[in-house]
Amino acid sequence: MADRRDVIILGAGHNGLVTAFDLARAGIKPLVLERRPVVGGCAVTEEFHSGFRCSLLAHAAGPLDSGIARDMQLDRHGLQWVHPEPRLFAPSPEGRALLLYSDLAKSAQEIAAFSPKDAAKFPELHALLARIANVLCPVLAMTPPDIDHPSAGDLFKLLQAGRSFRSLGRKDMYRLLRWGPMAVADFAAEWFETELLRAAIAARGIFGTAMGPWSAGSTMTFLLRAAADPDPVGTSSFPRGGMGALAEAMAAAARAAGAEIRTGTEVTQILVKDGKVAGVVFSTGQEMPARAVISSADPKRTLLGLVGPLHLDPSLVVKQRNYRCAGNVAKVNLALDALPTFTALAGKGTSAAALAGRIHIGPETDYLERAFDASKYGEFSAHPHLEVMIPSLSDPSLAPPGKHVMSIYVQYAPYKLRNADWNAQRNALTEKVIATLAAYAPDLVQKILAFQVITPLDFEQTFGLTGGHIFHGELALDQLFTMRPLLGWARYQTPIAGLYLCGSGTHPGTGLNGLSGRNAARAALKSLR
Amino acid sequence: MAAHFAPRARAERYSPMPTRYDVIIIGGGHNGLVNAAYLARAGKKVVVLERRHVLGGAAVTEEIFPGFKFSVCSYVVSLLRPEIIRDLDLPRHGLEILPLDGTFTPMPNGDFLWRVNDHAKTRREIARHSKLDAEAYEEFGQAMLQMCKFVKPILAMTPPDPTTLNPKDLGKLLFLGRRFQRLPEQDKYNQVQLMTMSAVDFLDQWFETDVLKATMSASGIIGTFLGVRSPGTAYVLLHHYMGEIDGAFRSWGFARGGTGAISNAIADAARAAGAEIRTQSPIAKILVKDGQAVGVALQNGDELYASVISSSVDPNLTFLKLLGAVHLPGEFVEEVQRYKFRGSSGKVNLALDALPDFLCRPGAGPHLRGAISISPSVDYMERAYDDAKYGRFSRRPYIDVVIPSLTDPSVAPPGKHVMSCFVQYAPYKLSEGTWDQQREAFGDTVIETLCEHAPNLRSIILGRQVLTPLDLEREFGLTEGNIFQGELSLEQLFFLRPVPGWARYRTPIRNLYMCGSATHPGGGIMGAPGRLAALEILKDWKKGAS
């Protein structure tokens, strides 16, 4: 309980920082060790071309859990959010544009140009998702119950969740039960008839996963995301200065609360003695004793890499090996001399105004599914699904005056390529991405000054994500809630006493909400205090 | 329970053409017949109305070519509930199951995988492909057995309503929860994975041999519009593992005389209990009076009246065609319209002059007596699915072949054979052309695919019947040609089957019940829906009487 740095947090990604803050605030001053020279993990802003800065990985956030944002007082630590409008721009190959705003009436008006029926249904879906979010949010913020021996607290929380579920009413209760395991393509088709809108919604269910819109269970991923933001197409908000600014504000908050953060310090081993954590070993060979280690690295890396199979039950090793975390996402960042001209915006006034949010490339659910098909056979998509942002439009500090950065999520790019090596495929992937975008913005090619490619292999090697999975493990029904990362070990503890997990590989683990970090801190504090 | 359903004396039942019945059952498929048998045994005056000239629905034997008897649709039996076989004493009514031994998978490289019921043999065979897999196979079998034991009572249970606080429903949910809780750690893990994962992801954890995984995963996709890599297919894998004949798990078989013999045995049991069964009696509509089902009008104009109408046809036919949406609440109609059929399979039945000769294992032999599975690799299976997703039949389909005449010579003339080919994928909705235009091309593709493995096939075909999903719909009344009366996907199972809130065999119309495969626990020649529906009807009957 004293101010000794004997509790170590591995990794200064957003979850590690939330855990650090919560522990520090509770009087346990942790030491955060980050392998890379900067804090943030996947939430970083880096200069990839002289004068051009970009959120390297995540480009739109969460949103961060409001409780965490409030507790950490991130605004006092320099964080400012940018909320671009429209939230989403989806061009169609025929040159039509679908623009969706935070203002539902405005979105409905845009949708009406495609289908008055859909326009009427859009706000209805929004309202329903908001009701469902009320049920799901407390579930995301809770430690998954112990199935074998549920405590009184577990039962109480489950009862509460059950009561809020019942508050939905019979119709919506059944809807939720039915939707969970369904394919998001079916879900979108149940609501809307406009293919472009269906695709934009389906995209949210498959983002970052190894699922296509026709994969069963992708609606669950959609609903989990909708729990954080009930807007059917999601947020486009990001911190001024890029994602790195969020990480820096979090780091500042954690430090202010009493945590110590050391960057450029790589831990290569977690020391275990008599089934208990004894300390960590640095890449320099130096050792540091610790009574507890909380790892924000992914579960495979933590347990199979840093701890090692020797200290684990063989059946657990097998299960951990079977934990699915093969990534399917690549990132391409472009430095642009000027804004590209999107054909679909020809009649829409200044195109800059329409491009501020996320740009969705993937006109039909079948298009998305075909993009996914390639990945099943170990190839990246010939016509990938892209999620694009031009953050410099709302935050000019990211690029030299008049110039822009474009951040592109590319799906699908399977970690394991068949008959090919990612390092040899970087340019081939970039060409596919640029060609795909150029179909919508033909002058893009002339405006590219420089590019950066981050392949799933880079995600693994540079950012330490096993398999290059941006969520530390597949978001599928068999790896959620009480099964994340493994059934029986979903409560942030591990079979090694004193070793905890706090990264995205734990419940709830979807994107930048910080809840894994907070839930883990709560679980760890129970025994640390 | 048997005492409760003691049949009445037959003499009492014998009156010509009663005009008023206790129960009218729509459809003489196996579920309708099981339903009839249970109700008749409980003393109800029952009539079964079948549209076609033969009983059995999709479990039917027909002589398509003179001398050749085909199990036209459904071709193997494994899921028929043992309690039904016992309660109805089906062996006494002529049911005889002949074992179907093994699965033979030819491979394009000239090799094959041949699994048989003999464990030691199969182990040696798998070891030829991978020693590790041979060991895992045994363990896998054990694990699946445990899983089947866990799932078994669920198949014999009317689904609870998870949205009510009714103590009975809560009790059932708690019972399920407790059972799960009591499973050993490893079984819990397996169970959860089975319910949520794709067949291939699940099998990847156990095995490394591609052809083994491909063939095993095939059972996960039969009759669904899903691929072997689609989440949720691992569960169906279990469904097909659950074969229990005479209490032995995992054995598949033929009925002597074809699948229709099962229906005939059930029909016989129903008749013996006093049920009346009429074929060639298509129904025009279900009669409703004051919001209650009161009878049916036949297409010939006859009207029959009963206290209960029990429909074994699918929800689309029952509610939208026979009943009419006007009688139903709008939300219910929407749910029925949303119910996914999406037929994905076809059938090619061949009359053969001789046996096919496989390149990888020439000559006749015991390998032809089991199932022959055209599933050479996981990618092959997945690509077959990809075609279907975009509205084409698979250029190279998954085919499950059986030659029942090898086991049951009565179904073909001496020396000749019948060959049944279950083909997937054949999507009901084609992106180009119609099934009437594509039927023969589809049949050709199947023959071509088979000829790649057994080139002599083309020259020994005496007759060929191609059934597309459209044919299944037209001939057998299966909407969109779905052989299970609706997709077996997670969102359409258990308390969600067929539609949320109506998984307990009842409908929004009083006295109208569902008893077909579209209700829990779903398709296959299981008979469980027919039995469970009968039990629910009797429960309500008692309540109404008291």
Image: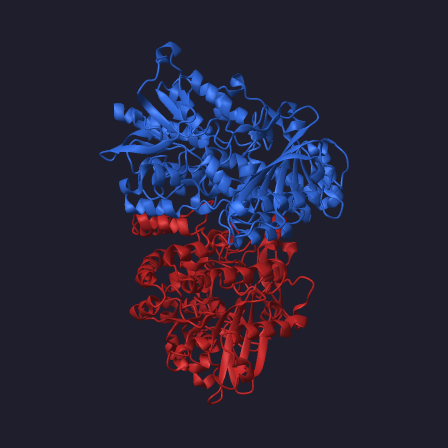
Query: Is any atom of residue A154 visible in this view?
Result: no
Q: Nearer the viewer, residue B191 or A399?
A: A399
Q: In percent of the image, x 57 and y 44: which residue is there? A: B424
Q: Which chain is painted in blue?
A: B
In front here: B238 or B58?
A: B58
User: The chain shown in red is which?
Assistant: A
Figure label count: 0
Residue B38, x across and y down, in percent = 41, 23
Q: Residue furthest left?
A: B290
Farthest bottom residue? A401
- What percent of the width, then of the height, locates residue B300? 35, 28
Q: Is residue B376 above or below residue B1?
A: below
Identify the colour scheme used.
by chain
Q: Is residue A258 above or below residue B347?
A: below
Can you say whether A174 is above or below A254 in the image?
above
Q: Position of residue B120 (x, y in %)?
A: 72, 34
Viewer-closest of B317 and A484 = B317
Q: Is residue B226 visible?
A: yes
Q: Is residue A286 above or below residue B14?
A: below
Location of residue A358 in the rendering, given as x and y in whole percent from the top left corner = 44, 72
Looking at the figure, which quarter contains the C terminus of chain A?
bottom left
Q: Is residue B194 left or right of residue A310?
A: left
Q: Kindly indicate the quadrant of the structure image that contains residue A35.
A: bottom right
